[in-house]
Amino acid sequence: MRALALGKERAFRELVERHQPGLYGFALRFCRVREEAEDMVQETFLRLFRNRHRFDTSGSVKAYLYKVCRNLLIDASRKKRPEPLEGTPDTDPAPSPFDTLSLKEGRHTLSRALDELPENQRTAMVLRHTQELSYAEISEVMGLSLSAVESLLVRARRSLRRRLQATAA
């Protein structure tokens, strides 16, 4: 961040290369439209660049980026209602048709269950389990204490488990 604050283009490029894939996955999970996810990530990096002189170097750049992206996503979701996710792309190179259908149904069920969680619980779950942020980073992104993040994740997991069991029954 110090190099970026000094106007080093290479430092900014390295930050983008390091964090763009994770931020894009996070944004896509919430807005479900590739172009919008790309716009959110681009705006996130633009804000980092604009605020590079004011960035607190004691904090985590990763957490800062996710926090900015999260805020952008929340603002955008308030402006419009997101469409439900039909399924996510299959990552297995050659699954059988049955496996493909089963995997898509499972992902769709999980996606719906996640969508039904309160916004804070859903955000914490996605940051922890798809973006693999630490509890401390989630705490910084969401502006919550560490114990609040832990509690949020426990409640989210419990709620997800109940919803998925009800769907399976």
Image: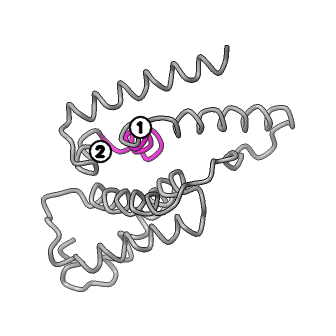
Mark 1 vs mark 2, CA separation in Å: 16 Å
Q: Which residues are magenta?
A: 122-134
- Residue designated by label 2: 138
Rendered view: 150 above or below 8: above
Magenta span contains residue 118: no
Callout 2 crowding tier (Cα within 10 Å): few <14, some 14–19, many ≥20: many
Quadrant where the image shows the C terminus = top right
Q: Position of residue 88 (x, y in %)?
A: 66, 47
Q: Residue type at mark 1: give it.
A: Pro
Q: Residue type at mark 2: give it.
A: Ile
Quadrant where the image shows the N terminus = bottom left
Q: What is the magenta segment's predominant secondary structure?
A: helix
Indicate which disc residue 88 carries: none
Q: Quadrant of residue 48?
A: bottom left
Callout 2: helix, strand or loop?
A: helix
Magenta span contains residue 133: yes
- Residue drawn at x 70%, y 46% as measured from the top left: 86
Q: Position of residue 19 (x, y in %)?
A: 40, 62
- Residue designated by label 1: 118
Q: Residue furthest top?
A: 169
Q: Nearer the viewer, mark 1 or mark 2?
A: 1
- Residue drawn at x 51%, y 18% as measured from the top left: 162
Callout 1 crowding tier (Cα within 10 Å): few <14, some 14–19, many ≥20: few
Instruction: Say which label, 1 or 2, has the lower sequence index.
Output: 1
- Residue drawn at x 50%, y 26% as measured from the top left: 160
